[in-house]
Image (cartoon, rainbow, N blue to C red):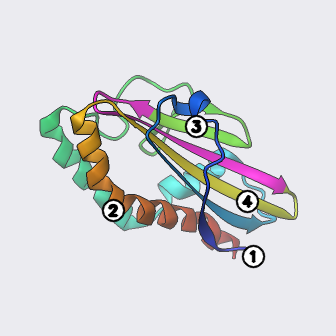
Amino acid sequence: MTGSVREITPEVDTGAVLSGAQFIDAFRAEIGAAPLTAREACTLMVLHGPRWVDVLTRLRNILVTPFGLKKSGEGAPAPGGLIGLFPVLSETPERLIAGFNDSHLDFRIVVEVAGDAASREVTLTTLVKTNNVLGRSYLTLIMPFHKLVARSMMGCIVEPVR
């Protein structure tokens, strides 16, 4: 069924992507025969996502400033450049890993495209490793929004395919 976004059991090797991650979840969408690479899928999600997600990101950047946390897109240059606010750490046509390490938490997203030419699917996996009480508090604060944001971003892949 093309078009549905569903939560799945994460299938990534946590140790290889973000060793020690305390939080991990994953969402998958069937995209039919759409010929997307992992970078194209990530770009659709991040750059063409719902405007309210951009508003939440800007609000987050304002709120974290007093705590000295990285703002979106800050930090050392990433090997694969940036997709929106996400530094690309590694990439193949089928799999892209983006994220960063900060004093409060380390964060990764994994975008994977799989399946044959007639029946393809995209999976978005999020991993978080908290480094201190600020990271644990931050994760607790954003959790109510995370699943909604992830599903909405995945919807940006499904919509052009319909």
Q: In the structure shown, which secondary structural element does the residue marked by tag 1 occupy?
A: loop
- The residue wearing badge 2 is 144
Q: Percent x, y for residue 91? A: 65, 34
Numbered label attached to residue 1: 1
Q: Are the residues tagged 2 and 3 within 8 Å (C-beta)?
A: no
Identify residue for label 3. 97
Please state which of residues 30 and 26 is positioned toward the viewer in this rendering. Answer: 26
How far, Cα to Cα, is label 4 from label 3? 17 Å
Q: How far apart are marks 4 and 1 (CA)?
A: 10 Å
Q: In this view, does 77 lie to the left or right of 62?
A: right
Disc 2 is placed on an element classified as helix
Q: Range of the magenta residues?
A: 100-115
| CB within 8 Å, label 4 to label 3 | no
Identify the residue under disc 4. 121
Residue positioned most to the right: 117
* Kind of residue indicated by mark 1: Met
The label nearer to you, 4 versus 2, is 2
Q: Where is residue 162 in the image (x, y as percent from the top left)?
A: 69, 77
Answer with mark 1 or mark 2, whichever residue precedes in sequence. 1
Instruction: Say which label, 2 or 3, has the lower sequence index.
Output: 3
